[in-house]
Image: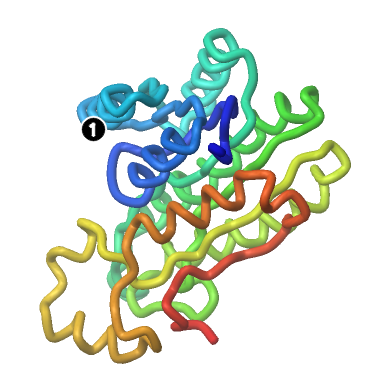
């Protein structure tokens, strides 16, 4: 039986990487997937891939850091799909630099998208879910929020904030039948690591008890479980998908 049958799921940043894998899996599990993506080309490509595989996918362009854009997304989904069952706040950006070299613009951009964008999307979706009396909100955190990472002041701050907001929202929204959880990926094989030197990758893998990088599908599967009724009594938690880096 498909775990997400008849569910309507918005997945931000689902034109590539973990977001794409999550969109494809949700569709296979029976959800109507809204590919909420800023990049028109990648967003449309994922929606097309879902439909060609026999699923239900639709691209809606959105800038999650812009409230009007997010409100337009929510209105579009309500008008077309009628309700919102799942929101996956996956979209995010990285602009790494050491504290010494980081610019205010680099700091503000990452906070604007990763932290404020997650807040905006959740605030708008939660209003609908409260009226429905149900819903699932899933946030993309990161293991670096738990132990810090060199050169990522802005990114770590944003993801630590996401973890904090997840716990607050779980407390506030639980009485409306809304579950809120976060997933914290570790060293995952995505396009973001393609420029990392091989010797650095080998050094990083030595810190992973499972001695390998994670795959995007392994993160997507955790999102799918959390979105399903199999996790009906799970809220306010952060699940590390990291091969044991944080133990």
The count of marks equals 1
Q: In the orientation shown, which residue stands out farthest toward the right? A: 175
Query: At 60% from the left edge and 42% from the top edge, which residue is drawn?
Result: 119
The quadrant of the image that shows the N terminus is top right
Quarter of the figure with residue 84 = top right
Helix, strand, or loop for circle 1?
helix
Q: Tell me what residue is drawn at x 47 percent, y 68 percent.
A: 241
Q: Estimate the x, y position of residue 22 in percent, counting from the top left.
A: 41, 45
In the displayed image of the protein, which residue is found farthest to the front?
A: 1
In this view, 98 is above or below 80 = below
Horizontal relation, residue 161 to residue 133: left or right: left
How are the residues colored? rainbow
Where's residue 158, x and y in %? 50, 59
Viewer-nearest residue: 74 or 69: 74
Q: Position of residue 152 (x, y in %)?
A: 37, 70
Query: Image point 54% across, 76% down: which residue?
Result: 146
Query: Does residue 134 appear left or right of residue 63 in this picture?
Result: right
Above or below residue 232? Residue 192 is below
Would you place residue 119 above or below residue 241 in this image? above
Rendered residue at 43%/33% (across/down): 27
Q: Which residue is mark 1?
A: 42
- Which sits in the foreground, 1 or 148? 1
**Foreground residue among 71 and 137:** 137
Q: Quadrant of the C terminus?
A: bottom right
Percent position (x, y) of residue 69?
A: 47, 22
Q: Residues within 10 Å of mark 1 (few under 14, many from 20)?
A: some
């Amino acid at each position: 039986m498909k775990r997400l049958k008849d569910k309507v799921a918005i997945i931000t940043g689902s034109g590539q990487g973990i977001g794409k894998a999550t969109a494809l899996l949700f569709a296979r599990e029976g959800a109507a997937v809204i590919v909420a993506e800023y990049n028109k080309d990648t967003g449309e490509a994922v929606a097309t891939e879902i439909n060609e595989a026999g699923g239900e996918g639709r691209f809606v362009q959105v800038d999650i850091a812009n409230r009007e854009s997010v409100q337009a997304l929510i209105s579009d989904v309500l008008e077309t799909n009628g309700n919102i069952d799942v929101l996956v706040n996956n979209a995010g950006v990285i602009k790494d630099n050491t504290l010494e070299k980081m610019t205010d613009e680099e700091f503000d951009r990452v906070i604007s998208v990763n932290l404020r964008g997650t807040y905006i999307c959740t605030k708008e979706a939660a209003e609908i879910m409260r009226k429905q009396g149900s819903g699932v909100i899933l946030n993309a955190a990161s293991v670096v929020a738990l132990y810090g990472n060199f050169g990522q002041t802005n990114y770590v701050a944003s993801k630590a904030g996401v973890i904090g907001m997840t716990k607050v929202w779980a407390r506030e929204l639980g009485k409306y039948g809304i579950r809120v959880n976060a997933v914290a990926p570790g060293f995952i094989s995505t396009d973001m690591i393609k420029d990392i030197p091989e010797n650095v990758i080998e050094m990083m893998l030595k810190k992973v008890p499972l001695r390998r990088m994670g795959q995007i599908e392994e993160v997507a599967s955790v999102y799918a479980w959390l979105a399903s009724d199999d996790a009906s009594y799970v809220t306010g938690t952060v699940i590390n998908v990291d091969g044991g880096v944080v133990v």
